[in-house]
Image: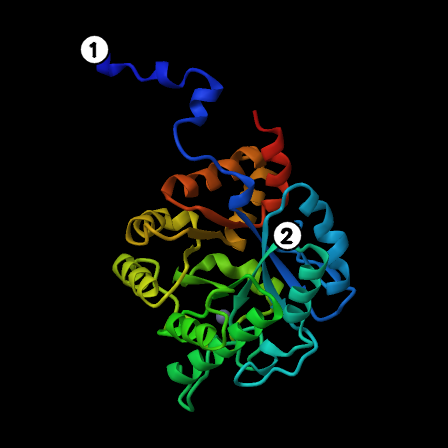
């Protein structure tokens, strides 16, 4: 056999196997959590095993043990159940709304925990779309991005370390960055862009959790078509140029090529990917059916994202990984 044929000598030991690529670690994990406007709520989401909607009074008991295990960051999603929704998403930046209350509470309870906040209007608009609509029900981009920038600023002012617009409106990264700078938050708040967010079938359980399905139509005029490699590359480059500090690809597993493209196109920025609700539910369902071991599959999916170039992973497996990463040889 030729000398060049032999590879196995290089990875025959467990330790030498870890040297073959970057490793998943706790600081990469960002845990998505749902905050609702019933302060004492702890409501399980049936389609998202093990995940709940939380009221602010429950955050100490919920997050405390995870912080002790090394939880480094969370991303907050508001789930208003009681508020009066309107066409322009008025309740999104209500100072008494769940997100702003949760930011303040978490800052006070866990000063070292990094808080990102999802920024969108769909949970707060009466029509369930992510922006302003004109009378003909098409998106009014200018009004949408001005409103989204206003909401992002409110979260930054409340103490969020990072704002993460998920709306996919054109020009919103520039609008948010400008607004943060003008108001003195340019160096106090990170801007993470959901740059390549695809119109995916994998968001179902999230929409159950967040109650954010559009009341008519769909989001295909602003989220990317699954076949759109070129559009994804253009969106990533655009958002880097508009001032994003972190780029995100969403969903993750069916879009590893896009993560890899983003690692090349935005090579000087941290790169996030979102293992979305449907991906999480799929991994759980397969394990329940005996197709594979849950832990092994959770590692394999997230390690594939790291291999593709991700440096941050938003995942509902975060609590388990905090245990598993301590156990892993
Ligand atoms: Zn939205």
Q: Dot 1: what SS?
A: loop
Q: Position of residue 288 (x, y in %)?
A: 61, 40
The residue wearing badge 1 is 2
Nearer-the-camera pick, 111 or 85: 111
**Does residue 197 appear anywhere in the picture?**
no
Residue 260 locus on image (x, y percent): 33, 47
Q: Quadrant of the C terminus?
A: top right
Spot occupied by residue 203 in the image (x, y as percentages of width and height)? 50, 60
Q: Which residue in the rendered view is the most extreme toward the left? A: 2
Q: Residue at x 70, y 43 (%)?
A: 68
Look at 61% across and 82% down and name the residue there.
85
Bin the neighbour count of mark 1 within 10 Å (Cα to Cα): few under 14, some 14-19, many 20 and up: few
Judge left or right: residue 201 versus residue 226. Answer: right
Is residue 313 rendered to the left or right of residue 3?
Answer: right
Identify which residue is drawn at 42% across, 47% down. Answer: 253
Residue 322 vertical position relative to residue 266 in the rendered view, above or below: above
Q: Quadrant of the N terminus?
A: top left
How far is disc 1 from disc 2 in space, using C-alphas? Answer: 54 Å
- Residue 305 occupies which quadrant of the picture? top left
Q: Is residue 208 left or right of residue 176?
A: right
Which residue is under mark 2?
112
């Amino acid at each position: 056999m030729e000398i060049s044929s032999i590879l196995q000598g290089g990875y025959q030991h467990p330790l030498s196997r870890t040297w073959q690529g970057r490793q998943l670690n706790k600081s990469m994990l960002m845990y998505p959590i749902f905050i609702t406007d019933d302060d004492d709520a702890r409501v399980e989401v049936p389609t998202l095993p093990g995940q709940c909607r939380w009221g602010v009074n429950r955050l100490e008991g919920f997050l405390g043990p995870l912080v002790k295990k090394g939880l480094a960051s969370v991303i907050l999603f508001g789930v208003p159940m009681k508020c009066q929704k309107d066409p322009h998403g008025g309740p999104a930046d209500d100072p008494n709304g769940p997100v702003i209350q949760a930011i303040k509470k978490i800052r006070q309870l866990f000063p070292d925990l990094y808080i990102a906040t999802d920024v969108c209007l769909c949970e707060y608009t009466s029509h369930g779309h992510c922006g302003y609509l004109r009378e003909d029900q098409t998106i009014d981009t200018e009004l949408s991005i001005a409103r989204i920038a206003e909401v992002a600023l409110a979260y930054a002012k409340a103490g969020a370390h990072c704002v993460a617009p998920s709306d996919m409106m054109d020009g919103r990264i520039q609008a948010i960055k400008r607004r943060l700078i003008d108001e003195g938050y340019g160096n106090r708040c990170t801007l993470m862009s959901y740059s390549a967010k695809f119109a995916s079938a994998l968001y179902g359980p999230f929409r159950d959790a967040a109650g954010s399905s559009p009341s008519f139509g769909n989001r295909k005029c602003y989220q990317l078509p699954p076949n759109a490699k070129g559009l994804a590359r253009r969106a990533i480059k655009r958002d880097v140029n508009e001032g994003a500090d972190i780029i995100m690809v969403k969903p993750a597993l069916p879009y590893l090529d896009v993560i890899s493209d983003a690692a090349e196109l935005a090579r000087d920025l941290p790169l996030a990917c979102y293992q979305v609700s449907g991906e999480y539910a799929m991994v759980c369902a397969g394990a329940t059916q005996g197709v594979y071991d849950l832990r092994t599959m959770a590692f394999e999916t997230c390690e594939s994202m790291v291999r593709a170039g991700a440096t941050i992973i938003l995942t509902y497996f975060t609590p388990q990984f905090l245990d598993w990463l301590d156990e892993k040889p």
